[in-house]
Image (cartoon, grey):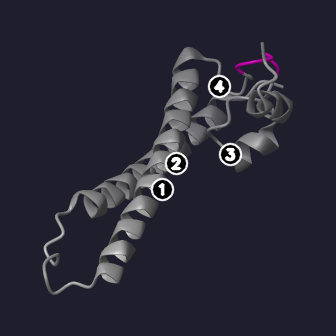
Amino acid sequence: MPLKKAEIEEFKNRLIELREQVTKTVRGAKEAVTQPDEAKGYSQHSADEGTDDFVKNINLEVTNKEFGLLRQIDRALEKIDEGTYGVCDISAEEIPLKRLEAIPYATMTVKAQEKFEKGLLE
């Protein structure tokens, strides 16, 4: 059963809110990674420097995952604008409401998502 306009509007608001939250997280991680290391110098122990590098790597990894999530959110918002939200990008089947409630940025059914992740799509 296709989604009602009110449901789509509710999902759109959730997606916009989620996008704002993720964008703030990315900005925070970006700032943490790009800040100059003012404490570096002769007095800092090499183990501390290694810890700082490790933290930066973790922040970069988080940022990459968040960017992926932003792309998914943007795609879901595009689908709302196109009038195809709730329809699988791969199979053109309806995405179950329960899935959209749990993952509002889902653009594929579970079955299609599994095939996509396993590289089984042609």
Tell me what residue is drawn at x 70 percent, y 20 percent: 89
Residue 87: within the magenta?
A: no
Residue carrying label 3: 103
Magenta: main secondary structure equals loop
Marked residue nearer the N-terminal end (3 or 1): 1
The image quarter containing residue 29 is: bottom left
Q: What is the secondary structure assignment of the residue under circle 2?
A: helix
Q: In this view, does 108 lie above or below 15?
A: above
Left or right relative to 12: residue 47: left
Tell me what residue is drawn at x 86 percent, y 31 percent: 111
Marked residue nearer the N-terminal end (1 or 4): 1
**Label annotation for residue 85:** 4
Residue carrying label 1: 62
Task: Please report contact status of discs 1 and 2: CB closer than 8 Å, yes or no.
Answer: yes
Q: Residues within 10 Å of mark 2 (few under 14, many from 20)?
A: few
What range is drawn magenta here? 89-93
Question: Which mark's residue is nearer the viewer, 1 or 4?
Answer: 1
Give the CA distance from mark 3 to mark 1.
19 Å
The amino acid type, in three-letter code, at marker 3 is Ile
Marked residue nearer the N-terminal end (3 or 4): 4
